[in-house]
Image (spheres, coloured by chain):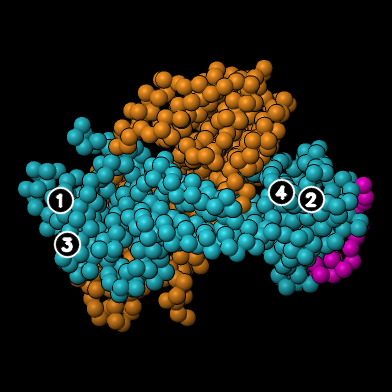
Chain colours: A cyan, B orange
Amino acid sequence: MISTKLITIGDELLIGQVVDTNSAWIGQHLNEIGISINKIVSIKDNEADILKELDDPKMDIILVTGGLGPTNDDITKTTVAKFFNTELVFDQKYYNDLEVFLDLMGLKMNHLNKDQAMVPKGCNIIPNTKGTAPGMHLIKGKQHFFFMPGVPMEMKNMMSSHILGYLKEQFDLQAVYHQTVRTTGVPESELAIELKEWEDSLSDNIALAYLPNYEGVRLRMSCYASDKETIDNINTQVGYLKKKYPQFVYGDGDQSLVEEVSNLLKGRKETLSTSESCTGGYIGHQLTTIPGASEFYKGGIIAYDNEVKISELSVAASHLFEHGAVSKQVVLQMARGIREKLDTNYAIATSGIAGPSGGSKEKPVGTVWIAVASKTRVVARCFQFGQGRERIVRKATITALNILRTEFLK
Amino acid sequence: MISTKLITIGDELLIGQVVDTNSAWIGQHLNEIGISINKIVSIKDNEADILKELDDPKMDIILVTGGLGPTNDDITKTTVAKFFNTELVFDQKYYNDLEVFLDLMGLKMNHLNKDQAMVPKGCNIIPNTKGTAPGMHLIKGKQHFFFMPGVPMEMKNMMSSHILGYLKEQFDLQAVYHQTVRTTGVPESELAIELKEWEDSLSDNIALAYLPNYEGVRLRMSCYASDKETIDNINTQVGYLKKKYPQFVYGDGDQSLVEEVSNLLKGRKETLSTSESCTGGYIGHQLTTIPGASEFYKGGIIAYDNEVKISELSVAASHLFEHGAVSKQVVLQMARGIREKLDTNYAIATSGIAGPSGGSKEKPVGTVWIAVASKTRVVARCFQFGQGRERIVRKATITALNILRTEFLK
């Protein structure tokens, strides 16, 4: 097993000024070629800390990002020279390339850029086609060290053009195969109980992980990419889960629920409209994140105020008075009203209490009525999504989309 | 100097399935109370690795996130017990609280949830009001250990409600005072040129940082919290910038633009409606993230399809035919149409090309027309927001809200 460490250097990471997206990108791309990172360490631009983290003889591969810029706070390069017991030397070839690069950018060489052509003696330079700092590859015994800038575009280019290919050639790698089944509408612990028997029957070659987020729980199955038999087995399991639990398994891979719903509507050449009260436009927003949404989404009404529900969606004032805006009667009419008004095949409606105020004993914060209408049918269901305004809106949106999806199964 | 380490646990972080946003949030919030993280380490759900990272006697504070879920791959809790040489015991009080929490969510206790009430003997439980896993605080000699779930909402709640306050009491911190001026509508480099003279005149005791995000650029001024004179100076600077640049300085502190606009509308007792094409409901969503939005936001129409623009907003078919949906004529009528229809004081309308397809030479992807109507005035402006569907929608939303805000200045 190859052991790998990623060191990210930069004060801005430790005081939270920058979210570290590089690590996830590097982790994912290494994983695809069969290298699993054992440890990610973020440290400051501080010589002692950098030296300490570089000195890790158990690691076969050490990747480092950050601290290679031209300003004074970037000390990675001098620290690297110190660690490898060598000096910085001027690299004429890199200097020439840098001149060409700067010229292309309409810039002139200055003394800060010139210093960038100084590299530790004996290193292999990794070209940087997106910026001015050189990448560096050094070998110590059996250990490989790679140093890259922290700028995501520059790092990604060095990884894709050089480092990933080099590692594949250098090591005998066991790539990993992942497949993900996406579920929604069932909490993690209930899902685990529901799937216990299935989980126990899984082959030992399959590693299973539950990955929850607000949209639902993803089930990730993994095995070695060389193990064709287990890959077939995983794909069979995906099919089994989809068939057995169509109510809450909505897809696989990277596909989100709104993508799945959009694809189904496009495939059926059918259209959708929305009338939103508590979700305030979030369902419309989610649908229109899909490129080409105009193929299936005509639009909708954000009926936040009761007057708008009456004047635009033909909700009866008597229903609002008798049952309140958060009621079956009102949400059913909202769905019917918008579907007829915009003449779509389907419509979604929501009405609920997102809080923090506005709740009552009968209808506490988190109560949401959701309706879905088609030409022949209208269904409405009541949910309790707990606390948290943003969370309630997101849960209501996901749930509404899933109800629409399950209507297609009928 | 207090030394602090953050350990984030979870295979998903190392294989890049999840971008670690928790670390930046924790780093930022610790920094605000005068604690600087020395090191962030991400490791797998693996007992040996966790034990090794916990065993770091140089650190005064060790914060740990992740691996506290109810499923088999979450092993942090048993590992904690092992590290502290103790056992897991059942906590009746936490169990009772959990029952109440699950009940509120409309869920029943199951055996996996029940296991969540098992905690290392002698730990102080940090309540979780957003989820089912308990947080834990343990002390070993002079070292403080805090264990939190990896779910951002749960972690943030524990930090804000318990841990940050506890650390402030426990340690003698040299707190840092930060004040932030929020701007929008001016790129970072232009802002830096505009403010150069002001920046040069700033006292050396004030550290200035430019923090850009999609909403605009925040200017953060910092000094030691004990330096009352400089704090006064910073507050004077905030007032100066607000007065001098009302067109692009919209607020200070944590207040977002949508909060500022909401407060202005509430203060004026005026109402707003929206008609959105390219933003697809995102403006409505942003407005309704504000608790009590119904005070000022009546609702709107998502006019994604041209038919809807004609039938619901009285846009002339001839205008659509002659000038296209992304035009001054159409967006002006969309704003007028919705304002009259919902009888509000103000209305916002958007029409643009969010891409990736649909652009032309005259109107490339990123072209967005925005209009704001009041009872006496309608203004429309055209913007070019570049590439990226999500980014264009967000930029259009922020820009529309800022145009409305500047209308209030007139």
Residue type at mark 3? Arg
Is residue A97 part of the magenta span, yes or no?
A: yes
**Which contiguous range is marked in magenta?**
A85-99
Res A151 seen here = no
Q: Are marks 2 and 1 on the same chain?
A: yes
Report which residue position mark 3 lands on: A377
Front position in the image: B361 or B207: B361
Q: Nearer the viewer, mark 2 or mark 4?
A: 2
- The mark nearer the N terminus, 3 or 1, is 1
- The residue shown at (12%, 43%) is A323
Above or below: residue A154 compared with residue B112: below
Above or below: residue B126 compared with residue A8: above
Residue type at mark 4? Leu
Marked residue chain, label 2: A
Residue type at mark 1? Val
Helix, strand or loop under label 3: loop
- The mark nearer the N terminus, 2 or 4, is 4
Marked residue chain, label 3: A
Q: Are marks 4 and 3 on the same chain?
A: yes
Q: CA distance from mark 4 to mark 1?
A: 55 Å
- Position of residue A379 in the picture relative to residue B63 (left or right): left
Q: CA distance from mark 2 to mark 3?
A: 62 Å
- Position of residue A147 in the picture relative to residue A386 (left or right): right
Front position in the image: A122 or B352: A122
Marked residue chain, label 1: A
Report which residue position mark 4 lands on: A6
- The residue shown at (87%, 58%) is A123
Q: Which circle marks residue A330 in the picture? A: 1
Front position in the image: A142 or A84: A142
Asked if the residue at tag 1 contacts the one at tag 3, i.e. Cβ–Cβ closer than 8 Å, the answer is no
